Every structure is written in structure tokens, then in C-alpha cells.
Image (spheres, grey):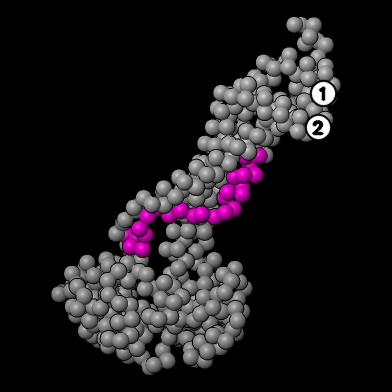
Amino acid sequence: MNARLIIRIAKALLLARWKQTLVAAIGVTFSITMFITLLSFMTGLNDLLDGLILNRTAHIRLFNEIKPSLDQPINQSKDYKGSYNFIRSIKSGSSRQEIYNSQAIIQALRKDNRVAGVAPKITAQVFFNDGSIDITGVINGIDAREESSLFHFSDYVTQGNPLDIQNVSNSIILGKGLAAKLLANIGDVVLVTTAKQQQFSLKVVGFFQSGLQELDKVQSYASIGTTQKILGKPSDYVTDIQLKMVDINQAPPVAKEFAKLFNADAEDIQTANSQFETGSSVRSLISYSVGIVLLIVAGFGIYNILNMMIYEKMDSIAILKATGFSGLDVNRIFLVIALSIGFFGGLLGLFFGFLLSLFIDQIPFNTPSLPTIRTYPINYNPAFYLIASIFSLVTTYLAGWAPSRKASKVDPVIIIRGK
């Protein structure tokens, strides 16, 4: 049968029961709108939470971990030579925390095409002296330019210039929580004491806020040179080498390779943040599940409306079949009706979903713990709109399949006799 004629008949049936058609289309529109909005908002929130960790975390970290010595003192005794000794209090090894030959390693890493950037770092445990009280803290010796380029360090410096720790000698950037404990302002001088009881005066040139309050209560940042001076170490002293990979998925195998190549411990970002990635995946799964459930509910609405339409239009179906329309033609007519509802309802759903996402994206979201965030996070991924379009058509097709099949099997003789 002529496709144009089938479409015209489907249109006539749709307009004849336009109120029911409108209800079905609104159901699809609402489902698609909420599907788009939920996914955009939830994935935007995931990206925000991921950014708090991933933006500040190296893809690969090279370091030397303090490990128990394999040769314990009791094993060196002649009295216990050849015995199997059970040791309760294991002594640590004599290895040092610094990475051996760090400058040569950094140069080699910068020549590797898989590595996007390298940032050396020193971690120093210190006490911040506040009168008679000592506050435990950590000074991270960094290259401010490399940290800002690779790990967005400058985005989290809420006051002051991050490069001041490079330009101002004996300077420090305090975590916001730590500064609050010390009652320190920019320009003040804080006193720190190392584990070897050496004291240094450092000038506060800025405040740092990562969004993780417990971290901001202990963390601070200084230049690598200042940190080496505090620890009394030479200019080649480095405890960590942080790597940013071109492809983050290569981090696990490359970490193992670098660990063997440079005789150091290596930790990749997937291993370090496995629990966090699991939470992100679960949140995304919940978002998709809710959206799909909404579409299925809309599909049941279309199914019920088409079923009612068939019962009400039995005489029209009988006339169509009596005038030469085959069962396949009738099947196609009702499938066109279902797909039309899905198409136009889905199209409006995409439009309203985008508008609602845009509206949420403009709502102010100001919180002291997240200084880089100004509005609610939204992810405008085109894949969401493509998935929503496919699901709207598939759902409405499946919703219309059973009623259209029932309509195609109507016997016109029985219907006309009944009339």
C-alpha cells in the first residue's frame, strides 16, 4: 500500500483522538526531559567530584617507600645462624625517602612521548608553632609553575599569587583550615619546627583551599628550594616525581615499567583511587536506571492509549480491511502512530531537557569548601541526547508493536456483523 496514504490515515486517527495523543506525547516529553536533565546533572556532579581528586592527583607517582629490612639483626648473630627466626618487632630498612639520581630520571621522563608532564615534589613533616602549642602539618615542596600547569594548583589558591613561593624567599602558602588554626594572615610570619628540632620562619604569601577540609587543615606549600633548606638537604633532594600521562588509561602498565626501570616504587591513579571510581560508576548507573525507568513508564502509557484507540476504532479498522487494506498495512498504520508520538514527544523532550539543564547551570552554587565552583555542575554531553532519542523511538515502537499486531488480526466480517 502507498506509504503516503498510510501516513495520512495515521495522521487522521491521531487527530481524531488528539487529547489522548497529547497525553501520550506529554508522557514521552516529560520522560526525555527528565532523562536528559538527570544525566546532565549527575554526570556533571561526578565530573566535579572527580576533578577534586583527579585534578590534584598525579597519574603516576614515583617514590621510595620505607620497607622492613630483609636482613634483621638476629639473622646476623652466629648463635642463630641457619635457624628460622620469628621476629615480632621488625626494624625498618636503611633506605632513604629521596629518589636516587632524581634529576636524570626527570630528564628521561620528559623525553618519553607517553608522559605529558613531570613535576618533582618534596614532602616534609613539620610542626607549626602556635605559642606553646605545636600543630602537626605537612609542607609540600613544589615547582609552582609545573603544579599549576599539570594539577591546576593556581585554581585552588584563593588568596595571593601561587608564583610568590618561587619569587619570595622563605615563603609559604597555607591551607585555609591550617591558617584558621594559626590565625595567620597574608604577610604574617609563621614558625615551623622540623623533626630534627630545627626552627624556621616562613612568610605567608597565600591561602590554599582544595575543597577537602581535613586536607586543608594540615597541608601547606613552599618552593622546592625552601623545603630543601628546611630539611637541610642538597639541591637534588626529591621525595616524589609526579607524572601526568597523555592517556590516563596507560598509567597502570607504565607505572610497573617505570618502577623496574628506575628502581623505585610507583603508584598509578587507578590503584590509588579505586574506591572513588567505583562510587562514580554507581552514581552514573543510578542516573541511567532512573531515566530508563521513566521512558518505560511512558511506553506503558502509549501502549494503553493505543489499545483503547484500537477498541474504539474497530469499525474503522474493519472498513479499512474490507476496502483492500491488508493486515500488514493496518499494522504499519498503528506503528506510524506510535513512532509519531515517540518522535515528536522525544523532540520536545530534548528541547526542554536542554532548557532545564541550562537553567540549572545558571543557579548560583557558592560554598566555602569549593572555591572554584560558581554554579551547579551540568554536563552537556551530546551522547545523552543521542541515547535519549534512540530510547524514545525504541520504547514507543515496542509499546505500539503489540496493539498494532492486534489491530492487524481484526476480522472485518465479525466486526461488521456485530454492528
Q: Is residue 351 magenta?
A: no
| Among the two numbered marks 2 and 1 on one chain, the one whose residue lies closer to the N terminus | 2
Task: Indicate the quadrant where residue 90 lies.
Answer: bottom left
Quarter of the picture containing the N terminus is: top right
Q: Residues within 10 Å of mark 2 (few under 14, many from 20)?
A: few
Residue 325: numbered disc: 1
Q: Secondary structure at mark 2?
A: loop
Mark 2 or 1: in front is 2
Side of 101 where 155 appears, left or right: left
Closer-to-camera residue (161/273): 161
Say above or below: 168 vs 285. Answer: below
The Cα atoms of the two marked residues, 2 and 1, are separated by: 10 Å
Quarter of the picture containing the C terminus is: top right
Q: Residue at x 59, y 53 (%)?
A: 383
User: Over which residues does the magenta segment extend?
Assistant: 369-393
Q: Residue at x 27, y 86 (%)?
A: 168
How far across and how far down the image is residue 332, in percent? 76, 30
Give the residue at mark 2.
2
Q: Secondary structure at mark 1?
A: loop
